Amino acid sequence: KTSKPIAVNANNWKEEPWGKGWMWDDYNEGYMAERSPFPIYGNLIKWIEVRDSSSISALANREAFVYSEPDINWKVNFVNDDSNHVFSVKRAMAENQFTIRQGREANARVSVPFLTQGMQSALELLPDTLGKGLFISNSKHDYQSIIHSQPADSLFRIMMYRSDNFFAEQILLMVANEKLNLMNDARIIEDLLHNDMKDFPNPPNWVDGSGLSRYNLFTPRDLVWLLDKMQSEFGMDQLRTLFPRVPMEASGDRAGDSSLVYAKSGSMSGVLCLSGFLYTRKQHRLIFSLMINNHQGSPRSIRKKMEQFLTQIGDLY
C-alpha cells in the first residue's frame, strides 16, 4: 500500500533459468517452469478454453472462448485445425509468443512456462496486479527488513503433495540466498555436501533442486540416511504433516487400514521411486527407499508391485 516507488533488485541472482542437464525439448511443459530471481504466477501462463456446452451449434462450429491467467500483451496466434481434438498451447522457444489450437473439449486448461528474461517478464506482469509500476535497482544496500509471509511448512507441504518441481527449485535457491547471500545451485549444493549433508553414505552427484536432471545420482541408501536425519531433527509429528499418506491395499486383519505409509514419490521416463516411512503390522517404523530404473513397462503395474512389496514387509515386521 506504500505510495513510494517499488524497486526490485536481482544482484544476488547467479543462476540460469534452466538447470544443468534439463531436457531442452520439455521447455513447453508445465512441470519445467523456468527459475528466476523473482517468480510471479509460478512462472506459468494458464490458458483456459471454455465452450458453452448448452449450445449445440457452438459445439458443432467449435466456437470457444480462450483466455489466459494472467492477462498478457504478448503475441498469440490461433491455428485452425479441424483434426485436432485436444486444446493445446505451444510457446516459441526463444520468445513469449504462443500458438493456440482449439480442441473439442467442453472446457480445458493447460499451463505453459513463459520466458522469464531475468526480471523482465515479472516487471511486465506485476503492474497489473499492483496498480503501479516498478523499476530495477542495482543498489548494493543491505535489506532494511525481511517480511516472512507464511510458515515454511506451508510451502514444503505444497511442494510435497503436488510434486512441484518449481517450488523445489526455488526453495533451494532461497536456501542459497539465506546462507550465502546469492542464488546459485552449485554453490549451495557444495556447501550442504560439505556441512549439513557431509555424512551421506554414498557421495551423490547432485545438480538441482527438483531432480529434473538425469545428472542427479543418489542411492536408496542415501535417501534412507537423509530420512533418518530428518526424523531425528524434526520429529515424526511434523514429518507426517508434510509427507503424503499413501493408501495401501490392506491384507489380513488390517483390512481397511490405509495409513501405513508416509512417502514421497518421484518419476521420470523409465524411472519410478518411492521413499518414506512404513508403519508395520506390529507398529514398528521402518525407513525405506525404492528405486526402479530402466523400466519399459506400465508405470501403474510397477507401482502395484512396489505396493505389494511394502505390504509384505508390513506384514512380516
Image (cartoon, rainbow, N blue to C red):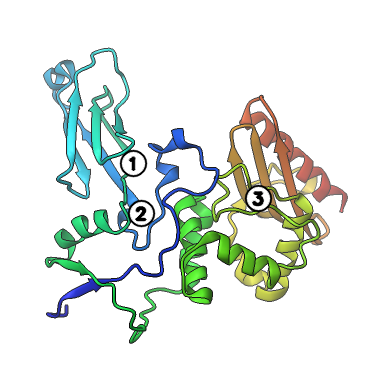
Task: Nearest to the eye among marks 3 and 1: give it.
Answer: 1
Which residue carries the number 1 mark?
Answer: 111
Q: Residue furthest bottom?
A: 144
Give the structural element (helix, strand or loop) at label 3.
loop
- Image position of 76 (left or right of 23): left
Q: Who is closer to the viewer here, 210 or 57?
A: 210
Which residue carries the number 3 mark?
Answer: 258
Q: Measured along the vertical axis of the image, is residue 52 above or below residue 221?
A: above
**C-alpha gap between disc 2 and disc 3:** 33 Å
How packed mark 3 is, by other alpha carbons closer than 10 Å (few <14, some 14-19, many 20 or more), is few
Which residue carries the number 2 mark?
Answer: 42
How packed mark 2 is, by other alpha carbons closer than 10 Å (few <14, some 14-19, many 20 or more), is some
Q: Measured along the vertical axis of the image, is residue 280 above or below residue 102?
A: below
Tag shown at residue 251: none
Split into 4 quadrants, where in the image is the C terminus? bottom right
**C-alpha gap between disc 1 and disc 2:** 10 Å
Label 1 with label 2: CB-CB less than 8 Å = yes
Residue 260 seen in render: no
Q: Who is closer to the viewer here, 307 or 231?
A: 231
